[in-house]
Amino acid sequence: MVQLEEQCIILELESTGKEAVLRELAGAVHDKCPSIDLDTITRILAEREQLGSTGVGNGVAIPHGKLPGLEELLLCFGRSSRGISFDAVDNRPVHLLVMILAPSDMAEEYLQTLARVSRLLKDATVGNRLLQAADTETILELFNRSPVPTP
């Protein structure tokens, strides 16, 4: 299973709007993998949001998409203490975001990762600890080593 990496963690997102936060998350992935075009990532995430918001409720959003030419699944974590209006299903602000990017020909691992991230972030204890984490090491520990609750 794919792991979150330190360089793809944004402890406090600067953006306050949905489109800007998608670009900020895309920028973190672009910084890690400069060969991935920033505008392409942003466009693919925006296109997915047009199908329906990836704001799943309880302060969580999981923007995701498939990128042609990508060779591996990538994750990026972002946190906003202010909260971001994200058109979430419960109309509440989003505080925790995990962006998932997958190669365009990947299906099973992509869906498994999406399900794993969703279950992890739905766990109130994990969510609260992610909100209160003071550093990237704590987020890595919670995200990569926490047992995933079963549905």
Image: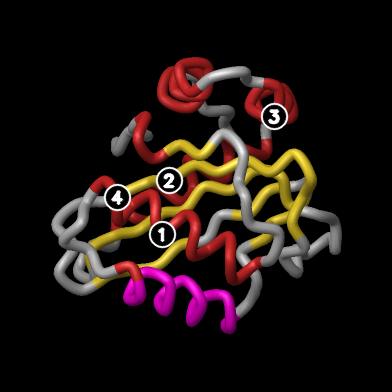
Amino acid identity at mark 1:
Ala
Residue of label 1: 26
Amino acid identity at mark 3:
Leu
**Relative to 115, 131 lies left or right:** right
On screen, 110 above or below 76?
A: below
Q: Earlier in the sequence, mark 2 or mark 3?
A: 2
Q: Secondary structure at mark 1?
A: helix
Is residue 46 inside the magenta stretch? yes
**Relative to 82, 60 lies left or right:** left
Please state, as top left, top right, bottom left or bottom right, where the C terminus lies in the image: top right
Residue of label 2: 76
Compute the Cα span from label 2 to label 1.
Answer: 8 Å
Q: Of the residues tagged 3 and 4, which is closer to the observer?
A: 4
Give the x, y percent position of residue 112. 39, 48
Give the x, y percent position of residue 78. 55, 43
Q: Secondary structure at mark 3?
A: helix
Is residue 81 inside the magenta stretch? no
Residue of label 4: 31
Q: Are marks 2 and 1 in contact (CB under 8 Å)?
A: yes
Residue of label 3: 131
The region drawn magenta spans 39-51
Q: Earlier in the sequence, mark 2 or mark 4?
A: 4
Compute the Cα span from label 1 to label 4.
Answer: 9 Å
Q: Nearer the viewer, residue 42 or 109?
A: 42
Give the x, y percent position of residue 37. 26, 69
Going 30% across and 38% down the picture, which residue do you hit?
A: 2
Compute the Cα span from label 2 to label 3.
Answer: 15 Å
Q: Of the residues tagged 1 and 4, which is closer to the observer?
A: 4
Give the x, y percent position of residue 6. 37, 29
Amino acid identity at mark 2:
Cys
Q: Earlier in the sequence, mark 2 or mark 1?
A: 1
